[in-house]
Structure formats: structure tokens, C-alpha cells
Amino acid sequence: MTTAAVEPIRQFIEYARTLKGDEKGEAQVFCDRLFKAFGHGGYKEAGATLEFRVKGTKSTKFADLLWRPRLLMEMKKRGEKLQKHYTQAFEYWLQLVPQRPRYVILCNFDEFWIYDFDLQLNDPVDKVTLEELPQRYTAFNFLFPVEKKPQFGNNRVDVTRAAAANVAGVFNSLVARGEDREQAQRFALQCVVAMFSEDAELLPRGLFSELLDDCKRGESTYDLVGGLFRQMNSQSPAKGGRFKGVRYFNGGIFQTVNPWS
């Protein structure tokens, strides 16, 4: 996402700061503005429902927002301890069949606790504050009109170590299969630069990680990673497609691109 595209998220934050954090009076407009920040006309235009009836065994309760099959969102007042409401959210989620939503968010206007009960039951897969949204919005990739795989996790040290280990593994694999060592070193270095450029928002946030995920699912590394590196070496910006918003890296490291399949 480009800096200009992050602007709606920044505007949402500014708006959220003006709210008192009243669960009953302001939760709905908060949800609507959140959907607008992620590219929808609003929650209704996206197809979500507010105050959705959840029929339990003894009574009917109301979920603050349901967007099948992606999201169940429960709002609490500002300052509320979200852990206290885990059981309520989980019980709602259990009742929402068929098309049970993949993700559950507990929010108190200042914090978002994101759950994926298919991965882990007790703990959130991520916790993001309102102020962190411009840097951490990829944890909410499932909110965009065109859904993307969310990138969870606040521990950037562990993530960076794992990424570096993966790059080292790629280099060793290329050399082991007989590829030119100098070309393999250049490719590994290009990958490292792309990873840190993504973190520094010199690349659209999440782009390189998304490309790698697609490669793991069987798409062409030659086309995706090679296409990115070639665009990073081009002074002519892409007018559309996946590489729109990729800036020109004028430094020589991408002047020669040798992607592999």
C-alpha cells in the first residue's frame, strides 16, 4: 500500500480519537469508518451486518458486527479489559454456522485483539493499537475488498531472524543445485534489501511477503520476484497491477536480475 493509500487509515485514526469510546452510542459509527478506511463504502456496502442476532441455547444475543465469512467484531467501551470478553466472543463464534467467520476482533476503540480460532483458541494471533494501524494494517488484510493473507505477529526480531534464515536457505539451495555462486549471492542480497525496504515502507507494505506466499502456493518465482526486482530497477512506474507503487531503486543492486523458478 502506498503512502497515499494509507491516508484513509490515518483519517480513521484522527476520527476515532474524537470519540468518547461509548460502546452503545459510538460502536456502529466506529465500525463503519473502519470499513471505509480499508476501501469500502462502509460496512453496509461491504455486506456486513450490525447487531446480528445470535441464537443460543437459552437466549438470543446480538453480535456488534458480522461479515460472513470473514469477520465477527465485538466492541467494548474505551478502557475496557478485552480479555474479560474472550468467552463471549468465542461463544458467539461457535453459534455462527454455517459460514462461521474466519477472524474475530475484540476492540475497545484503542486496541484490536485479533483471533483466528482455527489456529489457536486461547490467545490472539495479534494485538494492534489504534496508533499502530498505519504500520500494522497488514494484520487486517482480510478487511480489504480483495482479501489478502494477513501478516500477524508483533515480534519483529523473530520474524527478521526467520526471514534471514530463509534467505540463507535459498542461497544454499541455489548453490547446491549448481547455480552460479555470484548470481545466487546477488539474488539473496536483493531479497534482503526487499525485506527491509518493505519494513521501511520503501516498498508497499506487505508486498514482498505476499509475493513469497504466492510463490509457496505454486506461482512462478521467475514472474513474481523477478518482476518485482525489474520494477525496482525501472525509472518508469507501473501504472497498474501488483507492482503499482513500487519506486525506483537507484543504487545498482537491481541492475542485474537473475530470478529462478
Image (cartoon, rainbow, N blue to C red):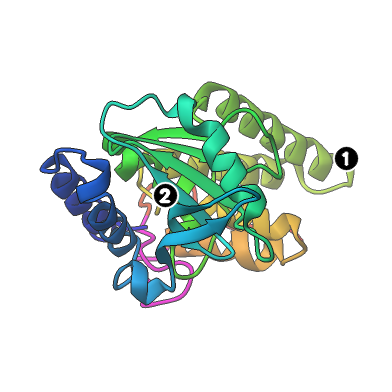
- Using residue 223 as the reference point, say whether residue 14 is left or right of it: left
Whether residue 124 is visible to the viewer of this picture, yes or no, is yes
* Residue at screen point 70% across, 40% down: 119
Nearest the viewer among 157 and 103 is 103
Residue 166: x and y, percent?
70, 36
Query: What is the residue that sits farthest to the right in this orientation?
Result: 177
* Residue at screen point 14% across, 43% down: 19
Q: In which quarter of the image is the N terminus?
A: bottom left
What's the amino acid at mark 1? Ala
Q: Mark 1 points at which residue?
A: 176
Badge 1 or badge 2: first in the primary sequence: 1
Residue 221: x and y, percent?
69, 61
Q: Helix, strand or loop at disc 1?
A: helix
Residue 63, relative to residue 44: is it above or below? above
Q: Name the residue under label 2.
A: 205
Nearest the viewer among 59 and 236 is 59
* Residue at screen point 30% across, 44% down: 134
- Asked which quadrant contains residue 149, the reply is bottom right
Q: Magenta segment range?
A: 234-248
In reply to whether residue 247 is colored magenta, the answer given is yes
